[in-house]
Image (tube, rainbow, N blue to C red):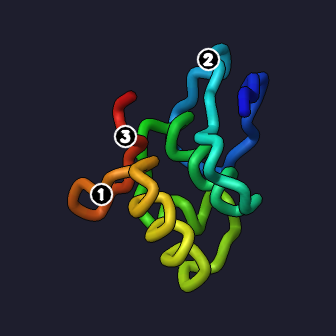
Amino acid sequence: MHLAVDRLDVMSATQFDTTDTLDVPDDLTAPESKLVYLFLAASSGATVEELHEALDIRRISLFPVLRTLTERDAVVREGSTYVPRAS
């Protein structure tokens, strides 16, 4: 899946380059997984707290999403930060 990011209105201190095109891995089908992945890719990584604040997803709901993204090698955990895996 190929999505162009024109603009992201996020209540976060994270800066985005809104001219890039982001590719979502084909094996991600759940909307929350896609949303979290796109946020991580656009922001070059985030903590659970940053994801919670920016996306308004409950922290407890983020953990299974992040586990799925990690198991599918879409993201890696670096300390407390989740970052998209380098292609």
- Secondary structure type for disc 1: strand
Of the pair 43 and 75, the residue shown nearer to us = 75
- Between the residue at mark 3 and the residue at mark 2, the CA separation in whole angstroms equals 17 Å
Most extreme residue toward the bottom, as rendered? 60
| Circle 2 crowding by C-alpha within 10 Å: few under 14, some 14–19, many from 20 | few
Name the kind of residue labelled 3 in the image. Answer: Arg
Mark 2 touching mark 1, by CB under 8 A? no
Q: Name the residue carrying label 1.
A: 77
- Which residue is located at x 57 percent, y 21 percent? 17
**Residue labelled with disc 3:** 85
Q: Pick out the residue farthest to the left.
A: 79
Quarter placement of the C terminus: top left
How far across and how far down the image is residue 35, in percent? 68, 52
Answer with left or right where residue 5 lies relative to residue 81: right
Structural distance between the alpha carbons of marks 3 and 1: 9 Å
Q: Is residue 43 above or below residue 20?
A: below
Residue at x-position 64% and y-position 59%: 33
Establish if 43 lies above or below 77.
above
Quarter holding the N terminus?
top right
The number of callouts visible is 3
Q: Name the residue under label 2.
A: 20
Q: How crowded is mark 1: few (under 14 residues within 10 Å), some or many (20 or more)?
A: some
Image-based side of 48 in relation to 78, left or right? right
The location of residue 30, given as percent across then percent down, is 73, 62
Q: Of the residues shown, which amino acid type is indicated by label 2?
A: Asp
Query: In the picture, residue 86 is in which quadrant?
Result: top left
- In the rendered view, does 47 fall on the left or right side of 31? left
